[in-house]
Image (cartoon, grey):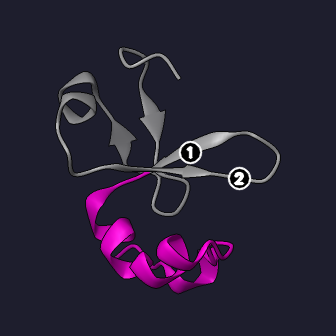
């Protein structure tokens, strides 16, 4: 992924900006198919077990509150 190109958190749809790309809050998630997605800080913290153990991320575990 180009660091200057915005991406979205696949869990909550928060946009990853250039300023976010320079920080450490977002984490990359690499799928077995080779695609890379970026998780925002809150979603990273919510799924740290799955990330560290290499399990698939479960979308249903994320809820976006209004």
Q: Residues within 10 Å of mark 2 (few under 14, many from 20)?
A: few
Compared to residue 62, the image places residue 7 above or below, namely above
Can the viewer see residue 66? no
Compared to residue 28, the image places residue 19 above or below, namely above
Q: Nearer the viewer, residue 30 or 58?
A: 30
* Residue sitting at x 47%, y 33%: 7
Helix, strand or loop for disc 1: strand
Q: Nearer the viewer, residue 41 or 53?
A: 53
Helix, strand or loop for disc 2: loop
Compared to residue 51, the image places residue 31 above or below, namely above
* Residue sitting at x 34%, y 55%: 40
Residue 2 spot, x, y in % from top left:
47, 16
Question: Where is mark 1, residue-wise?
Answer: 37
Q: Is residue 52 magenta-colored?
A: yes
Question: Where is mark 2, residue-wise?
Answer: 31
Residue 34 spot, x, y in % from top left:
75, 40
Tag 1–tag 2 contact (CB < 8 Å): yes
Chain part drawn in magenta: 39-66
Mark 1 / mark 2, whichever is N-terminal? 2
């Amino acid at each position: 992924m180009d660091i200057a190109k915005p991406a979205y958190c696949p869990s909550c749809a928060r946009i990853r900006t250039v300023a976010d790309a320079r920080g450490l809050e977002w984490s990359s998630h690499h799928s077995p198919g080779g695609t890379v997605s970026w998780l925002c800080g809150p979603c990273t913290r919510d799924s740290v077990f799955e990330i560290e153990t290499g399990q698939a991320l479960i979308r249903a575990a994320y809820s976006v509150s209004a």
